Amino acid sequence: FVFLVFFLLFSYKWVRHRMEYAISDAAFVKSDYLASLSFETSGKLIEIYPQLGSEVKSGEVLARLDSEAISLKLKAQESMIESLESQIQKLRLERDRVLLELKSGIEAAGFNFERSKASQDAALRDLESAKISLEQVERELKRAESLFKEGLLPKKQYEQALLEFNLSKKRLESANSSYEAFKAQTSQALSAISELKAKKLIANELDAQIRALEAQKNAMIEELSAIKLELSKTVIKAPFDGIVARKFASVGDNVRAGQAVIALLKKDSMFVEVLLEETSLKGIKVGSKATFRLDAYPDKVFKGEVISISPATAASFAILPRDTSAGEFVKLTQRVPVRIKLKEGPMNLLKLGMGGEVKIKRE
């Protein structure tokens, strides 16, 4: 009788427990953040840093290919760009010097030319006037000399005419000297303007050289960017904070572009996926509380809650789905993937792919 009572009590609790909880042992630890990392170029693997299970930070270098040839190419390109930049700076300084000389000299040269030309024109008018005056005085002197020889003109008047002639001759010489001096000044002013025009041409030529070198430098900078991109492809960096889950290659291996080298699991990204029977879905919804025990550690309890229920059964995604169009089939209970986020428990014990038993509280 005691045994019967114990059996009935046990059966009641078992049935009640099954009614209150959806229980399944088709539960596995998974993660949406398991990345198989690879290089974007081929080469010889010379370094692979972290150990299996070690934690890495986002951006941390995980593996490196031999990039000596690319590095030398990069340094040579940078050196050539620096050399071009130095040439451009020198040409700019020379151009700025020429432009400064032009700015300070062009106004002065124009003013000097105008002034010299005006003085030359005035001197030319004075010269022409002096020539006409000398011609008149010379005629008067010849007439006075003829009259003086005939005794018709006093000597004093003849000497006065001779004096006027000599003075006019000296005035002509002086006017001619002034004219030649101003003519020389005008010529010098024109030469200065010609020199300034030549400097303007020099400045234009320097500008053309600068533009050509800058175009060459820009082209080399684009090449430098391509080399840097090529160099960046010889390094694998962690895309997120995570844990090294596996290494697929060793130092010294020749790896191909796209070949998996290292697998990285995002820290705290693991969840439990339960393939729950469709007949056990009653009362299960997002937010339902759940407990999970690993097969490897049955005495350890993890607590969490349902975060999603798949809108399709697992069989819906099979490569070869069952053909039921003929009506001949064996009815099987389908399983629906239910995802559980663990919030409490010894998380360090979780390993991707581990199995266990899940209990979900019905509501």
Image (cartoon, helix red, strand yellow):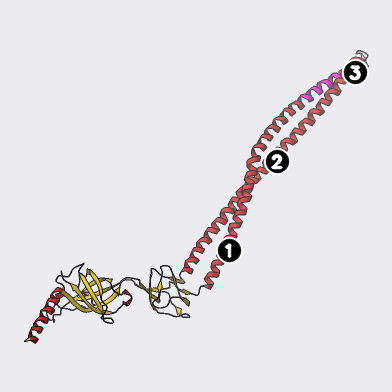
Q: Secondary structure at mark 3?
A: helix
Q: Is residue 35 shown left or right of residue 19?
A: right
Please say if 285 is above or below 149. Answer: below
Q: Is residue 301 visible?
A: yes
Is any part of residue 319 visible from this angle?
no
For disc 2, the neighbor class at 10 Å (few under 14, some 14 to 19, many from 20) is: some
The residue drawn where x is 72% and y is 38% is: 188
What residue is rendered at 55% in x and 59% in y? 217
The residue at which mark 2 appears reads as: 191
Question: What residue type is disc 2 on?
Answer: Ser
Nearest the viewer among 360 and 157 is: 360
Residue extent of the magenta highlight? 128-142
Residue indicated by mark 3: 159
Label 2: element kind: helix
Q: Residue 79 got which mark?
A: 1
In the displayed orientation, state which residue is furthest to the front. 2
Calculate the distance from the C-alpha at mark 1 to the C-alpha at mark 2. Answer: 44 Å
In which image quadrant can residue 9 be found?
bottom left
Going from N to C along the chain, the mark reached first, 1 or 3, is 1
Instruction: Give residue 18's position: percent from left, percent from top.
Output: 14, 77
Q: Nearer the viewer, residue 253 or 22?
A: 22
Q: Amino acid at mark 3?
A: Glu
Q: Nearer the viewer, mark 1 or mark 3?
A: 1
**210 with respect to 152 (left or right):** left
Please name which of the two marks, 1 or 2, marks the residue nearer to the observer: 1
Which amino acid, mark 1?
A: Ser
Cβ–Cβ under 8 Å for marks 2 and 3: no
> Along the horizontal axis of the image, is 107 left or right of 216?
right
For residue 314, side relative to residue 80 (left or right): left
Question: Splitting the image into 4 quarters, where does residue 181 fall?
Answer: top right
Q: Percent x, y for residue 156?
A: 91, 15
Q: Position of residue 244 (x, y in %)?
A: 39, 75
